[in-house]
């Protein structure tokens, strides 16, 4: 397979992008909330962030099972479109390694730290 040089990501789709920039993208299992799981991939996994294809549906609170078998919970989901960059559109899922923790919404600071205007 011919690979274009790193940094040359013009007009690539999500699958091509993951194959160009990792040694092996992986698939995850997503809990649907209906008692079953769906395979999602290819994904790029870091410690607290997972990058997924643009057709992924994983709102905050969704549980994901990593290839290692570890379960994580989505705390924020951001759709990133190409917006004139060389990156393909994709989802960025911020996750917590504490799957039973309820996602907090709103500001990250305690209320006492907020100043009144």
Image (cartoon, rainbow, N blue to C red):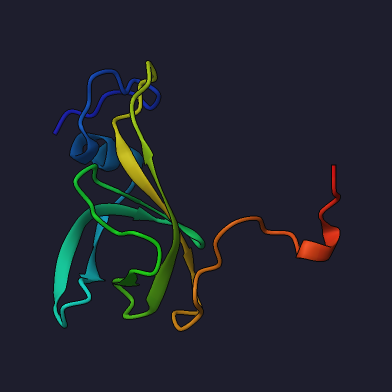
Front-most of residues 105 and 100 = 105
State which quarter of the image contains the N terminus.
top left
Place of residue 115 in the rendered image (x, y in percent of width and height, measured from the top left): 86, 50
Please say if 52 is above or below 5.
below
Front-most of residues 38 and 47 = 38
Res 8 quadrant in image? top left
Q: Is residue 57 left or right of residue 73?
A: left
Q: Is residue 23 left or right of residue 48?
A: left
Place of residue 20 in the rendered image (x, y in percent of width and height, measured from the top left): 29, 36
Please say if 83 is above or below 107.
above
Please say if 69 is above or below 25.
below
Q: Is residue 97 left or right of residue 90?
A: right
Query: Residue at the spot x=29%, y=71% of the render?
Result: 67
The answer to whether residue 24 of the structure is visible from this angle is no
Query: Residue at the spot x=76%, y=65% of the render?
Result: 110
Place of residue 55 in the rendered image (x, y in percent of width and height, measured from the top left): 19, 46
Query: Residue at the spot x=29%, y=59% of the render?
Result: 58
The answer to whether residue 83 of the structure is visible from this angle is yes
Query: Residue at the spot x=29%, y=18% of the render?
Result: 10
State which quarter of the image contains the C terminus.
top right
Which residue occupies the extreme front position in the image?
117
Place of residue 93 in the rendered image (x, y in percent of width and height, measured from the top left): 40, 54
Res 85 quadrant in image? top left
Front-most of residues 5 and 95 = 95
Tally of marks: 0
Front-most of residues 8 and 89 = 89
């Amino acid at each position: 397979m011919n690979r274009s040089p790193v940094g040359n990501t013009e007009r690539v789709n999500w699958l091509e992008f993951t194959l160009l920039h990792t040694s092996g993208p992986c698939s995850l299992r997503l809990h649907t909330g209906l008692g079953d799981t769906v395979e999602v991939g290819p994904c790029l996994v870091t410690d607290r962030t997972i990058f997924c294809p643009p057709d992924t549906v994983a709102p905050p609170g969704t549980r994901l099972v990593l290839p290692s078998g570890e379960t994580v919970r989505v705390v924020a989901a951001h759709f990133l479109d190409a917006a004139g960059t060389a990156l393909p559109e994709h989802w960025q899922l911020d996750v917590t390694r504490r799957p039973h923790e309820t996602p907090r919404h709103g500001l990250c600071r305690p209320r006492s730290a907020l100043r009144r205007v």
